[in-house]
Amino acid sequence: MSSMTETPDQHGTSAGTLEAGIAVKSATITYRNGHTAMRDASFEAPAGTITALVGVNGSGKSTLFKAVMGFVRLARGSISIFGRPVAEALRQNLVAYVPQSEEVDWNFPVLVEDVVMMGRYGHMGFLRRPRPNDHQAVAVALARVGMTDFRKRQIGELSGGQRKRVFLARALAQDSRVILLDEPFTGVDLKTEGAIIDLLKELREEGRVMLVSTHDLGSVPEFCDRTVLVKGAVLAYGPTAEVFTQANLEIAFGGALRHFILSEQRNGESYPVGVITDDERALVLRDGKASRMVASSERLE
Ligand SMILES: Nc1ncnc2c1ncn2[C@@H]1O[C@H](COP(=O)(O)OP(=O)(O)OP(=O)(O)O)[C@@H](O)[C@H]1O
C-alpha cells in the first residue's frame, strides 16, 4: 500500500493510507437536553485533502464541527487531530474555524484587520501584543483573499462574500493545519465562490486538511476529494466519486431535493443529463432567456 508521501491529487482514491488529519471514531454526541444529534460516526479526513460534510438542515453537520472544536463532549468514541486529542490540538493552535454568517455579530464595531489579527492570538503572549510577524501574517492573509483594500473597514460594512473572505483570512493568519468551513458559499456569488475554491485547493497543496459543510451540491465534486454524508449518523463516507451517487443522495436528502432529467445533444445523439439541486429556485434558461421548468422532473422520495 502507498504511504503518506502520495501527492494531494491521489487523496480522493486512497482511503486509509494517508496521515489522518481528522479521525473520528465511533463518535456519539448527545446534547444536554438528551438529544443524540450524532450516533456512532466514523470518518477520516487525511492531510492534504478537502472533505465535504453534506446533509440536510439538522442532520448534524454543525454538531460534528462543534465536536472537532471541543465545544461539545462525546458521549462515546473519539476524535483525534493529527494524532492528538482535540484539547491538545486546540492548545497547539492546529484548528481554525470559518463560521456561518449567522454566528457572527455584524454590529460589533471591529475593523477587518482586527478580525484577521484575532487569528494570531494563539501565537501571541498573554498581553496579546502583535509583533511584526503577526502584522505580516495579517497582511499576507488579507492579500490572499483579495481584501487588502478593505482592511480599515468595519466588518458590518461589507457584503456577504467579503465577510466570508475576512473570516477565511482570519483562518489563514492563524496558520492552522486543520480548517473547518461552515457553509462557506452561502450568500456568495459565483465569482467569489470560484476564488474561495481556488484558495482551498492551494491550501490542500500545502498539506492542510479542510472539512467543508455545504448545501452547494454542484460544487462538491469540483473540489472535494472526499464526502461524508450525514443524517444523525454517517450514512456514507469515502471518495466523492463513490459517495456522491443518486442512491446515496436520495437517502441523505429524501424529498428535500429536486431531480431533473434533461437531454443534451452531442454529435447528433441525444444524452440524458440529470440535475440534482437542493435549491428550490433553480433557474432554467431556454435560448438564453429565463423560463419555467416544464421538462420532466420528479421530486425524490
Ligand atoms: N445545543 C443544542 N441542544 C440540543 N439539541 C441541539 C443543539 N444544537 C443542535 N441540536 C439539534 O441537533 C441536531 C443537529 O443539529 P446541527 O446544528 O448539528 O445540524 P446541521 O446539520 O448543522 O443543520 P444546518 O444545516 O441547519 O446548519 C438537530 O436536531 C438540532 O435541533
Image (cartoon, rainbow, N blue to C red):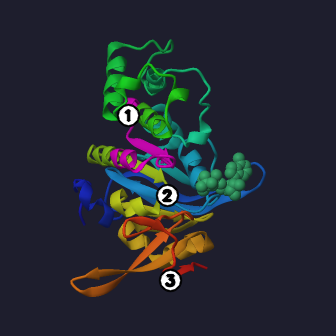
Q: Which residue is mark 3?
A: 296
- 187 is within the stretch colored magenta: yes
Q: Is mark 1 within 8 Å of ligand 1?
A: no
Residue that sits furthest to the right in the current view: 33
Query: What x and y, as percent, mark residue 89?
Result: 46, 38
Q: Is residue 123 above or below residue 284?
A: above
Q: Residue at x 56, y 75 (%)?
A: 251
The reply to whether discs 3 and 2 touch (Cβ–Cβ < 8 Å) is: no
Q: Is residue 131 above or below residue 191?
A: above
Q: Residue at x 26, y 87 (%)?
A: 269
Q: Is residue 48 above or below residue 12?
A: above
Q: Is residue 117 left or right of residue 199?
A: right
Q: Which residue is mark 1?
A: 172
Separation of marks 3 and 2 at Cα, in angstroms: 30 Å
- 64 is within the stretch colored magenta: no
Mark nearer the N terminus (3 vs 2)? 2
Q: Which residue is mark 2?
A: 53
Query: What x and y, as percent, mark residue 260?
Result: 48, 77
Q: Circle 2: is it few (<14), some (14-19), or many (20+) Cα within 10 Å?
A: many
Q: How many marks?
A: 3
Query: What x and y, as percent, mark residue 257?
Result: 56, 70
Q: Secondary structure at mark 3?
A: loop
Separation of marks 1 and 2 at Cα, in angstroms: 21 Å
Q: Residue at x 57, y 55 (%)?
A: 61
| Residue 76 showing in the rendered view | no
Residue bounds of the magenta highlight: 172-195
